[in-house]
Each structure stands twice: as C-alpha cells, then as structure tokens.
Image (cartoon, rainbow, N blue to C red):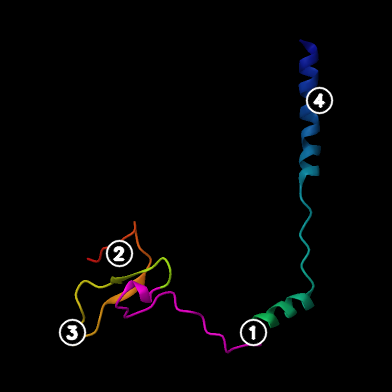
C-alpha cells in the first residue's frame, strides 16, 4: 500500500515540469520582404487576359442536343416571359429528369 502512494506522489511532483516542457515555442514572424512579394503577386495583372471562362450553362436552348454531355434542355421558369422569349436552358438533370419549377 505504501508503494502506490509513493509512486502517485512522485508523478504529482513531476506534473509542473511536464507542463513547462509541453509548451510550444512562440511563432516567429515571416520576413517583411516575403510578405511584400506575396502582396505584389496578388495585385499583378495576369500575362494572358484573352482567356474567357466557358459559361456553366447555355441559355435559350431548344433541344437537349444543343446542351453539353450530361445536361438537358429544361424549362427554368414557371411561366414564359411576357413579350415572347424562352425560359429554357441547359441544366444538370436531377434523377434523370428536368428539375421541377414552381
């Protein structure tokens, strides 16, 4: 019975030293010149500005053949707009069908 008590007291005596050793060192700040270089890259104009991103959908389709692979030509509004026009666009199907429009 005396041995476990002594072991427990020894562990409790070492607890403050373990906490002091477990602390992480303070982080050092990066050099100022690397920060300035990084900020300069954010405001730099890209070398090639003639690239235009492709649209994610095609508006005013009439058939699904006009849409990209895996898309359907669907009605995307509840009622057609006044003055003509269409409410059809290429969209990704949900469960193999056009999404419901309310």
Residue range of the region highlighted in magenta in the rendering: 47-67
Question: Dot 3 surroundings within 10 Å: few (below 14), some, or many (20 or more)?
Answer: few
Q: Residue furthest top?
A: 1
Question: Dot 1 surroundings within 10 Å: few (below 14), some, or many (20 or more)?
Answer: few
Distance from label 2 to label 4 (Cα)?
A: 72 Å
Q: Residue at x 66, y 87 (%)?
A: 47
* Nearest to N terminus: mark 1 or mark 3: 1
Mark sitting on residue 43: 1
Mark 3 highlights which residue?
82
* Nearest to N terminus: mark 2 or mark 3: 3
Distance from label 4 to label 1 (Cα)?
A: 60 Å
The reply to whether the magenta stretch includes residue 55 is yes
Q: Can you give x and y, in whole percent of width and height, for residue 65 in the image?
A: 36, 73
Left or right: 93 with respect to 7? Answer: left
Q: Residue at x 76, y 60 (%)?
A: 27
Secondary structure at badge 3 equals loop
Give the foreground label among 4 and 1: 1
Mark 4 highlights which residue?
10
Q: Are marks 2 and 3 in contact (CB under 8 Å)?
A: no
Secondary structure at badge 1 equals helix
Secondary structure at badge 4 equals helix
Mark 2 highlights which residue?
98
Question: Dot 4 surroundings within 10 Å: few (below 14), some, or many (20 or more)?
Answer: few
């Amino acid at each position: 019975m005396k041995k476990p008590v002594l072991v427990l007291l020894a562990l409790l005596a070492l607890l403050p030293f373990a906490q002091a050793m477990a602390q992480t060192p303070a982080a050092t700040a990066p050099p100022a010149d690397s920060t300035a270089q990084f900020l300069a890259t954010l405001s730099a104009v890209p070398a090639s500005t003639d690239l235009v991103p492709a649209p994610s959908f095609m508006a005013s389709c009439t058939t699904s053949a006009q849409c990209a692979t895996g898309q359907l030509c669907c009605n995307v509004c509840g009622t057609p707009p006044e003055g003509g026009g269409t409410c059809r666009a290429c969209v990704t199907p949900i469960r193999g069908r056009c999404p419901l429009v309310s």
